[in-house]
Image (tube, grey):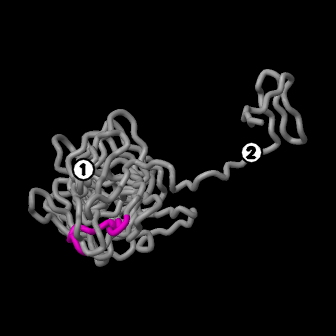
Amino acid sequence: MAIEYRQFESEFGYKSPGFTVDNAGNVVVTSLAYIGGSSSSTSGDYSATEVSGNFRLASDDFTVAATDNPTIEFTRGTSYSFTLTLTTVTFNLINTDGTTLYNTGIAHTAVNDVISTGATAQGKTTGKLVISVPADAPDTLYYGDADGTPKGTITVVDPVVTGTGSFSDLVVTGSTALQSLAVNATTDSTEVGIGSLVVAGGASVAKDMFVGGTITATGINANGLGVAEFKAGTNIVLDAGNKIEVIIGSTQIGIVGPAGSTVPVTATTINGTTIGATTPSTAAFTTATVTSSPTVNNDISNKKYVDSTATSLAIALGI
């Protein structure tokens, strides 16, 4: 009697504890677990096979044809996966010098789902290798066997972003024009080279800048057109560890220090200013005008008071 193999059929569906199929083909399960092939067997960005002792690389998007030891391109901040099917050669990521291994940002998943990272992810023949290119990766890397032969070149480039982009790290090495830049990190700046935003060169700001904390600088040069202004809603405090120098037109006018001020008072009105009230001293004036009459013994007299007093004395004494 011949045996005929046919699919299981049910006109009204199927039902068992935790698993139901209705007559329309809808499936209801209590739980569903995938125990099929390892995650390392799924396809990656590149397939790496071996042909005559060479790396035969091909990209899944067909931008890199299946050729031996081709030059490929990485973009900083992007991850790339390689499905390895090698025999006599091992896959290694090699530094710019062409000799030492580059262990940053690499992870390998074996066929049994064992994951290794860094240096332990190098030298694999099977499984899947993922390379996450850091923002500070060098411009040139290599992939190759442990002894460097065979070897292919990896050209590393910066990402090109149009519109709005979000980055965990952003390294700007050339001239960059941004419509806006928001830095959400909160690292405080305690010295040069530390902070949420670090600029290795100069910075040019065409419009206003608001700083919520303290500005620490070796110098502030307000050399723009017009009159430079320093405004404060409350007080302005000039706190110097030694002295404050007043310089106008490259000429030092005077110094304000712990012992006093050498800034001359020239062609200046000092109305309402007390002079020598705490420690009496001497003063020399070319001209001085006293409008009020003296009322106490140490007041300064003016000529009108002296003349009227002299006249009164003359009359009183019959002179």
Near-viewer residue (12 or 77): 12
Above or below, 93 against 281 in this view is above
The span shown in magenta is 87-99
Residue at screen point 57% across, 64% down: 112
- Image depth: mark 1 or mark 2 in front: 1
Q: How many marks?
A: 2
To which quarter of the image does residue 162 belong?
A: top left
Above or below, 159 against 253 in this view is above
**In the image, what residue type sits under mark 1?**
Thr
Near-viewer residue (52 or 243): 52
Label 1 neighbourhood size at 10 Å, few (<14), some (14-19), many (20+)?
Answer: few
What distance separates the C-alpha of mark 1 from that of mark 2?
Answer: 41 Å
**In the image, what residue type sits under mark 2?**
Leu
- Furthest toward the left, the residue is 250
Q: Which residue is mark 2?
A: 32
Residue at screen point 29% across, 78% down: 259
Near-viewer residue (165 or 30): 30
Residue at screen point 28% across, 63% down: 143
Q: Considering the whole magenta stretch, tell me its main secondary structure.
A: loop
Q: Position of residue 46 (x, y in %)?
A: 37, 50
Asked if residue 114 lies left or right of residue 264, the reply is right
Asked if residue 281 lies left or right of residue 31, the reply is left
Near-viewer residue (261 or 271): 261
Q: Which residue is mark 1?
A: 67
